[in-house]
Image (tube, helix red, strand yellow):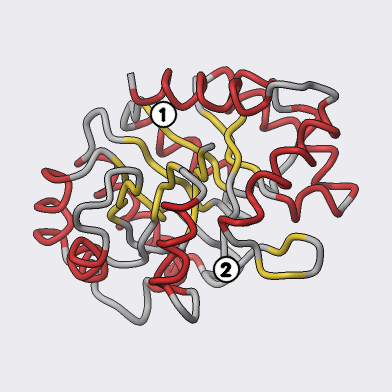
Amino acid sequence: MIDAHIHIDFYDKPARVIREIMREDIYAIFVTHLPELYEKQKIAIEGIPQIFLAVGFHPILFNEYEFKQSLFYNALKSTKFVGEVGLDYSVARTEKSRSKQKRIFEQICKSVNSHILSIHSRQAEEDVLDILLKYKVENAIFHWYTGSKELVHEIVEAGYYFSVNPTMLRTNKGKGILKEVPLNRILIETDGPFSKFNGNIAEPMHLKMIYEAFEEFYNVKDIEDIVFENMSALIG
């Protein structure tokens, strides 16, 4: 199974979560919030081949932390994955702050080649898509998408993917979005520890049940194979 988006370092006991991933034979994309954290977590997952570390700069941190370009660019040499990156207009409410977020995101998009981006797009979905297209970003995954159903079709047409989590199954809006996403564009994430499953913080040990919940929603029996094929297509 694949967990397309997880924040291992935000769990109370990251080492236990890493052991769960290994025990359950899960392939996980471990997203980070800052390039500095990427460097730190490289040590934590050293020698664990099924955890893929992504270098990120989370948009909610744009006022608190400087975007260290050289550190970010250097990290791109050692990973195929970038995340969590993007825009968040729920915290950037003025044009000045949104412009700052966009400058950072544009710098990131200009710097990637065939990297796979895990995208944060809260209340900024159209601008995120515009920037991805402007810089001809090849591979992007819209993580926990909450935008309009109409824009889903434009994202799919652009060749991008969606990573979906169990929280989306709990709301009418989430289920409405899921119905618009074709199965050949679906990846599944826990987004732990920020998402919940059955009232508990989502963890790798829940992933099998999460996959089963999506099989029930989509009325398919082989969603693990579908997700594997989609990720394989992304990785190339």
Q: Is residue 224 above or below residue 17?
A: above
Q: Quadrant of the C terminus?
A: top left
Toward the right, the furthest residue is: 172
Tell me which residue sits at (73%, 70%) in the image. 200
Tell me where residue 67 appears, x and y as whole percent: 24, 67
At label 1, the amino acid type is Leu
79 left or right of 137? left
Q: Quadrant of the N terminus?
A: top right
120 left or right of 46? right
Separation of marks 2 and 1 at Cα, in angstroms: 31 Å
Tell me where residue 20 appears, x and y as whole percent: 49, 59
Sequence-wise, which precedes: disc 2 or disc 1?
1
Q: Secondary structure at mark 2?
A: loop
Tell me where residue 30 appears, x and y as whole percent: 39, 54
Residue 135 lies in quadrant: top left
Tell me which residue sits at (33%, 26%) in the image. 136
Task: Check disc 1: other Cα within 10 Å, few if <14, some if 14-19, many if 20+.
Answer: some
81 left or right of 72? right
Tell me which residue sits at (69%, 39%) in the image. 211
The foreground one among 195 and 49 is: 49
Nearer mark to the viewer, of 2 and 1: 2
Q: Secondary structure at mark 1?
A: helix
Q: Is residue 77 above or below residue 71?
A: above
Tell me which residue sits at (47%, 47%) in the image. 119
228 left or right of 211? left
Toward the front, the furthest residue is: 23
Q: Disc 2, disc 1: CB below 8 Å?
A: no
Residue 32 lies in quadrant: bottom left
The foreground one among 150 and 145 is: 145
Residue position for label 1: 133
Residue position for label 2: 193
